Amino acid sequence: MSENLLDAAMEPVASSADDIPEKFRDVETGKLRVDALLKSYRELEKRLSQRFAPPGADAPEEERIRFRRAIGVPDSPEEYAVEAKHEMCGADPAINAKLHAAGFTCEQVQLVYDLAAERLLPLIAEAAADYEAQKQVAKLAQEFGGDEQFRRIAPQIAAWGRANLAPPVYEALSTTAEGVLALHRMMAKGEPSLVREADAPDAVDEAALRKMMRDPRYWRSREPEYVKRVTDGFKRLFGQG
């Protein structure tokens, strides 16, 4: 009967005693010592796991350096190659030294700078904008005679600007102290028709005076000169002037 070649191919190949290392061979029988092989494997596995574990505080410096190199930490902080995402977040030697002492890899150091550019820069820009806005508000308060006076007239300027100017123009002027002062000067001049009526008291009539009274300068801010014009107009109209 012929031999089944497939079965023969799947049968384990017998090892001779010479193929077994001496420490795994039984000296009497020459056979493989499974217990010794298993023990050796477990010791090897333990060494491999310890090799990639962080060295302890009392570990030799050579072991610490070997471990740091294995995980990607350069030998010195000068070897960090940082690609700055913004000119304000470039590599800093002092920071790199601290990161190196903490065992940061090149990839981790790059991530630190990337996060600074992504998260810190917007916060810095926002803080700078708030600080500048506070300076501009303080300047306006000084121009108008104090915080209370500016808070009182600011809504009037805003209402006039929105009602009489194109939105882009109003937005541009309202972002600086100089722009707000320009808005106030334009508002103080009033509508051309009202200014002409106030400048020509002999031709004024009651309807024009009533219209002037609806102007915020009369009923809200009570600007003395404007109120006087309205008062004088009524006096002239009813023969009291």
Image: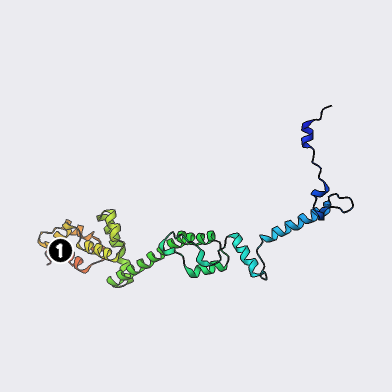
Q: Which residue is mark 1?
A: 233
Disc 1, SS = helix
Few, some or many residues within 10 Å of mark 1 (<14, 14–19, 20+): many
Please name the residue shown 29% across and 58% down the image: 172
Q: Is residue 114 visible?
A: yes
Amino acid type, mark 1: Gly
**Outermost residue, front direction?**
18
| Place of residue 149 in the rendered image (x, y in percent of width and height, measured from the top left) | 30, 70
In this picture, residue 52 sits left or right of residue 230: right
| Place of residue 114 in the rendered image (x, y in percent of width and height, measured from the top left) | 48, 59
Please name the residue shown 20% across and 60% down the image: 190
Name the residue nearer the viewer: 135 or 9. 9
In this picture, residue 157 sits left or right of residue 57: left
Q: Give residue 196's quadrant in the image.
A: bottom left
In the picture, the quarter occupied by the N terminus is: top right
Name the residue nearer the viewer: 126 or 96. 96
- Color theme of the render: rainbow
